[in-house]
Amino acid sequence: MRFMMIVKATTDSEAGALPSKELMEAMQKYNEELVKAGVLLAADGLQPSSTGIRISYPEPGGKPKVIDGPFTEAKEIIAGYTLIEVKSREEAIEWALRMPDPHGYGQGEIELRQVFEAEDLTDNPELLEKEAALRKRVEEQKA
């Protein structure tokens, strides 16, 4: 099971404030623990929404609309993420609870969401085979 720990933005992260040295060290230690346990798939911080681009589809079948950041409502914006693969929902919660306060000022908030697997979306063998082939190609390109 894959889970994404979504770190919510704060006014500081949206202002481009970088984490303290202490927080960077704590996050590094946490990521090392994830690696040692063999559950880490990816982990990255995101630049503020002022450098972001939002693409929306306001009309069914219509052209997409491109909007440059910044975006309002910092609490609705993602500041970073960690993607893990674990055996259970409970294990994902345990890992999320071990993450240091992502912003270091008592403003941190993490949303934990399970990632859909192809089998959750369809039972069509042809589509599942195509999805597996795409994932294999991605892995081969990484190597």
Image (cartoon, rainbow, N blue to C red):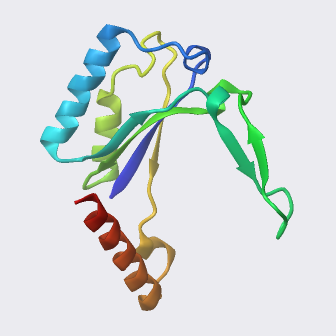
Q: From the top left corner, tell me how far across and down residue 109 is, in percent.
A: 50, 26
Which residue shows up at 44% across the image and 90% down it? Answer: 126
Residue 20 drawn at (x, y percent): 38, 9
Instruction: Say left or right for 51 vs 64.
Output: left
Q: Is residue 135 above or below residue 7?
A: below
- Give the quadrant of residue 137: bottom left
Query: Is the residue 37 above or below the residue 19 in the image?
Result: below
The N terminus sits in image quarter: bottom left
Q: Position of residue 75 (x, y in %)?
A: 63, 27
Q: Residue furthest left?
A: 36
Residue at image location 72% in from the left, 30% down from the top:
71
Count of picture labels: 0
- Between 13 and 120, the one lying in front of the other is 13
Q: Is residue 136 left or right of residue 74?
A: left
Q: Residue 61: image x %, image y %?
A: 82, 70
> What residue sits 42% from the left and 22% below the top?
102
Quarter of the image where one finds residue 32: top left
Give 9 or 90, whichever is nearer the viewer.
9
